[in-house]
Structures are given as C-alpha cells and as structure tokens.
Image (tube, helix red, strand yellow):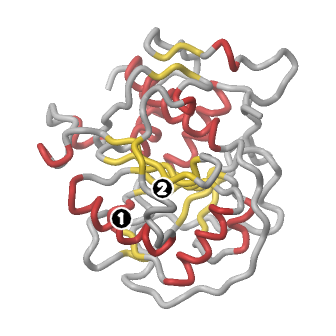
Amino acid sequence: MTARKIIAVVAVALSVMMVMAAVTYAQRFGGQGGRRRGGYGGYQAAARRPNAQSFTGDFTFCRLAYHQAYDGDGGGWGVDYPRADQNLSIRLSELSRAPVNFDESHEPNFYVLIATDPELFDCPWVMMSEFGGTHFEDNEATALRDYLLKGGFLWVDDSWGTYAWQHWVGEVRKIFPNEKEYPIVEVPINHPMFHTLFDAKKFPQIPNIGWAQSGSTSERGADSAVPMARAITDAKGRIMMFMSHNTDFGDASPTSATRMSAKVTTPATFTRSPSTATPSGSTSCYTP
C-alpha cells in the first residue's frame, strides 16, 4: 500500500471517528458478566483493562471484547490488537487538534472492555473487530442497547461476505429486536460524517496486509467485492452503530505505523473540509 493510499485510508477512518466521538457521554450503569460461549479468546497481547482513573475526557480508544460464536465467521475481538488501537490514536493526534489520551511517556492510552462493564459509559466511542464472529449474551445485548440509546457510539469493522453479515444481523437483533424501529441503513458517501474533517471521495476496500499481496482487495472474492458502509440511527437520526463491511480499517491502522511518515500531506482526494476547520486556539475539531 502506497503512502498516499495509507493517508487516504486513515483520512476516512478519522472522518468517522471525529464525527462520532462528539456524542454525549452516556450515564453509568451497573452489571455483571454472563455465561460464555466460546470465551473471550482471539488475542495474543494482554488486554489492558480500565479503572476509575483511566479516562481523562480526551479521546480514548475503547475496544469491545465479545464471546466467540461457534457458528460465526471471524478471528475474534483481538484481531489487530493492540497496534490498531495505538496507531489510530496517534494518527488522530497528528492529523487533527483533537485531544487524545496519552500517558506520561506520551504513549496513547487504550482499553479493552466487555459490554457489561460500567466503564463502558466512560467511552463515548467504542470499536469492535471481526464482528462476523460475535456472540452476545442477553445481558450484554441489553447493556449495549442502554449504552447506545444513552448517547454511545459503536463502530464494528472487518467482516467479509454474506455468511458473516447474516450472522451479525442476528446478533444486532438481540440489541435492537424491532427492525422497523431500528433498521440497518446504507450510509451514502455524501453523508456529513465523510465530509466533516476530510472530504472523502469514496468508501475504500482495505484487505489485511497479507491478503493485499495477492493483488485483490476482496478477501472473499465475488462474495465480498463491494465495501459497505451501514448504520443504525436513533429517533433523531444520530448514528449509534456504524458498520464497515467487506473492508478492514483496523488492519490499515497498524500498517500505517511502518509505512507512513509522521509528517503527512493530505492527498487531493481527501482534502480537509473548510467548513469544519478548527478555529485558532481551539484544541478540538469536533462538530458541536
């Protein structure tokens, strides 16, 4: 992947992040963990768990861990962990004036949560990877519904093909059973979320770094040929859940760490949106 393509990919990811991280912090709630199905496997690095001092009010990458479904299609919640979490936070701080949660050594803070953690409500922005392999227990689905309806935002990424999508829809309907009230809708490229920080010209298909060497961007051939941007909104039209299907933004983030200079130039296809330029002296480019 060339430097220009990497910058374009990061620009789309940041466009999603910057709009959705502006959501109101949800209220806290209590809950207990439920029965496991397949466990919380799928990662090699030790999961960083939050505590009461973890959140500063600055952007913090929160990753949702989930049970691995026996009948799903995905590599587990920890795919691309922790490099995607670290590097996407770094790119956000480099390409915007948004305040990012760093530790004393200037390394980004990032945390792994499960749906029943009360700390979930300290994370206005949460991400999941390989969502085609998810299994939610009933109490987890209830907790996520409360979180999303109270102002939270969930971005699920990196799932490929028809089978994985159909499996995911079944899990979504545990969270929002009424599909007429909460339908899954397509997000067109002219949606404001793609033009708030950068002007995105298209929604890209990004394969994992190993697959990219094959010369194709579709990991499941014709069954995943078209990248899809989908969402569920609340009654006011706010996107609560964003779903990037047949593409892998998470893999682009760790890849960018070794192939992209810290000094970047936004390519012509991803120009910074003048209508949302950050005022002088401001520390945030979030849209009110």
Which residue bears the numbered disc 1? Answer: 169
Q: Residue at x 45, y 41 (%)?
A: 254
Q: Is residue 112 above or below residue 187?
A: below
Q: Is residue 143 left or right of residue 221?
A: right
- Please provide percent x and percent y for residue 71: 25, 76
Q: Residue at x 78, y 30 (%)?
A: 284
Which of the 4 quarters of the picture holds residue 209? top left
Residue that lies at the very extreme toward the right in this rendered image: 281
Which of the 4 quarters of the picture holds residue 168? bottom left
Give the SS element for disc 1. helix
Using the image as rendered, state which of residue 235 and residue 6 is in the foreground: 235
Q: What quarter of the picture does the C terminus occupy? A: top right
Q: Residue at x 71, y 17 (%)?
A: 277
Q: Residue at x 81, y 17 (%)?
A: 279
Q: Is residue 14 above or below residue 121?
A: above
Q: Is residue 261 left or right of residue 173?
A: right
Q: Earlier in the sequence, mark 1 or mark 2?
A: 2
Q: What quarter of the picture does the N terminus occupy? A: top left
- The residues tagged by marks 1 and 2 sit, at their Cα atoms, a distance apart of 24 Å
Which of the 4 quarters of the picture holds residue 285? top right
Q: Three-letter amino acid code at disc 2? A: Tyr
Q: Three-letter amino acid code at disc 1? A: Val
Using the image as rendered, state which of residue 270 and residue 228 is in the foreground: 228
* Other residues around mark 2 within 10 Å, as few (<14) / some (14–19) / many (≥20): many
- Please provide percent x and percent y for residue 157: 42, 51
Residue that lies at the very extreme toward the left in this rendered image: 222
* Other residues around mark 1 within 10 Å, as few (<14) / some (14–19) / many (≥20): few
Give the SS element for disc 2. loop
Q: Which mark is residue 81?
A: 2
